[in-house]
Amino acid sequence: MRVIRQSDVPRYTDYKKYKPLLRKDFFYRCAYCRHHERTFGQVASMSVDHFRPIKPFSHLEVAYENLYYCCCECNTYKSNKWPTQEQLDAGVCFVDVCEEEWEDHLEIRSDVTSGKTSIGNFTAEQVRLSRRKLTTRNRELRMKEFKIRSELGRVDRMRRRFGSGIDAETARDLNESEQILLADLSAVLSPEPLED
């Protein structure tokens, strides 16, 4: 999902003040690993990254278009890294989720985040997107989703088995179970933002 930034933002002299706006722009997800802030349990586990590092881009320190919402882990690994001029000339850079789709360059396969393109490979390597903690989180989310979808399949099979002969109480129970499971699935795929 590509990030569409807000166009009318106040001007601050402290880049950290942009964090509430960035949260919304980035759908409460890290720009690099794409994990939702809820995964980390608190907004304090999320940070503001300078996409182009302050050194040598000091003129962009408080430029809203240069600020990205990301988890503290990814921010630590990305740090002040930036491709060399030679790499930039060869088309190698970080995935810019404000300009392109994350999924065009990166993928999660067997719970490991890796690059699909040279840009994705560079990003995955520099931000260490194959790190163990992230792989574990990817697996946990995949397993939660799998379990819920399996239960939804079971509810659907029960409905088909009963067919038109289903009694009202059983139909109500199946509908209730399905609604709970759909809410659980939504919480996994599109979690609600954390409270500030």
Image: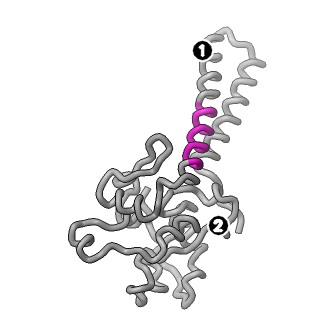
Q: Residue at 41% x, 58% y: name it.
A: 124
Q: Residue at 47% x, 53% y: name it.
A: 130
Report which residue position mark 2 lands on.
Answer: 45
Callout 1 amino acid? Arg
Report which residue position mark 1 lands on.
Answer: 160
Residue depth check, mark 2 versus mark 1: number of the one nearer the observer: 2
> Is disc 1 placed on a helix, strand or loop?
helix
Callout 2 amino acid? Ser
Q: Which is nearer the eye, 150 or 90?
A: 90
Quarter where residue 86 is shown: bottom left
Q: Position of residue 91 (x, y in %)?
A: 24, 66
Q: Which is nearer the eye, 168 or 160?
A: 160
> Going by the picture, which residue comes out furthest to the right?
169
Q: Judge from the rendering whether residue 124 lies leftward or rightward of residue 193; answer left or right.
A: left
Q: Which is nearer the eye, 102 or 89?
A: 89
Q: Position of residue 39 (x, y in %)?
A: 63, 55
Q: Which quadrant: the N terminus? A: bottom left
The residue range painted magenta reads: 136-149
Magenta stretch: dominant secondary structure: helix
Disc 1 crowd rating (10 Å Cα; few below 14, some 14-19, many 20+) is few
Q: Position of residue 20 (x, y in %)?
A: 61, 73
